[in-house]
Structure formats: C-alpha cells, structure tokens
Amino acid sequence: MARTREDQINSLLISFVAVSLLTFAINQTFSSIASGNDSDFLIEGLTILKNRGYDSAGIATMSGIPSDGLVR
C-alpha cells in the first residue's frame, strides 16, 4: 500500500517528537501498543535514533495468536 505525502510527513513529525522526547528522557523506557502493520513507522523511528547515536533501541512484536510467541 502506497503512503501519501501527508502520511509520510505525519510519520516524520511523530518520529521527530518521539526522538525529542527521548532526548529529554535518557535512560527511560518508551513503549507502544497498537494493532495493524506499523513496521515502516517503527523502523523509521529507530533509524532516526540510530543516526543520533542511540544504541539501545529495538522492536518486539506479537501476533494475535498466543502460540506464536514474541518476535524480536
């Protein structure tokens, strides 16, 4: 599914806000719970963090099926 220009700008703004918040809250934990496929958004945010020098970020996801377990 192609993302519109507005969706891309919104994703960048949200990523910027997340990075800004993390800048002020070093050594804090951030988490989010959502449904749907937001992997592109999460990867984009982690890329921004990586480019700023953060080395302790990651993604963990779960499918809707409990037997599938945790995916890192």
Image (cartoon, rainbow, N blue to C red):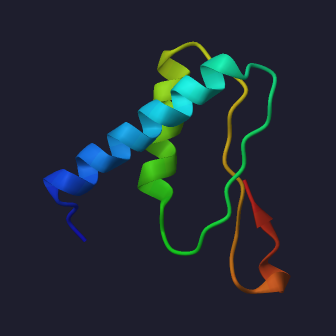
What x and y, as percent, mark residue 71? 73, 61
- Spot the residue most to the top: 53
Which quadrant of the figure has residue 46?
Answer: top right
Q: Would you say 28 lies left or right of 34 here?
A: right
22 versus 68 height, above or below = above
* Residue at the spot 51% in from the left edge and 15% down from the top edge: 52
Which quadrant of the figure has residue 23?
Answer: top right
Q: Nearer the viewer, residue 28 or 36?
A: 28
Q: Quadrant of the N terminus?
A: bottom left
* Residue at the spot 49% in from the left edge and 38% down from the top edge: 45
70 versus 53 height, above or below = below
Q: Would you say 24 lies left or right of 7 here?
A: right
33 versus 63 height, above or below = above
Q: Would you say 46 lies left or right of 59 here?
A: left
Q: Nearer the viewer, residue 30 or 65?
A: 30
* Residue at the spot 79% in from the left edge and 65% down from the top edge: 70
Which quadrant of the figure has residue 25?
Answer: top right
* Residue at the spot 48% in from the left edge and 69% down from the top edge: 37
Number of numbered discs overlaid on the protein picture: 0
What x and y, as percent, mark residue 26? 74, 19
Q: Would you say 62 lies left or right of 12 here?
A: right
- Spot the residue most to the left: 5
What x and y, as percent, mark residue 31? 72, 49
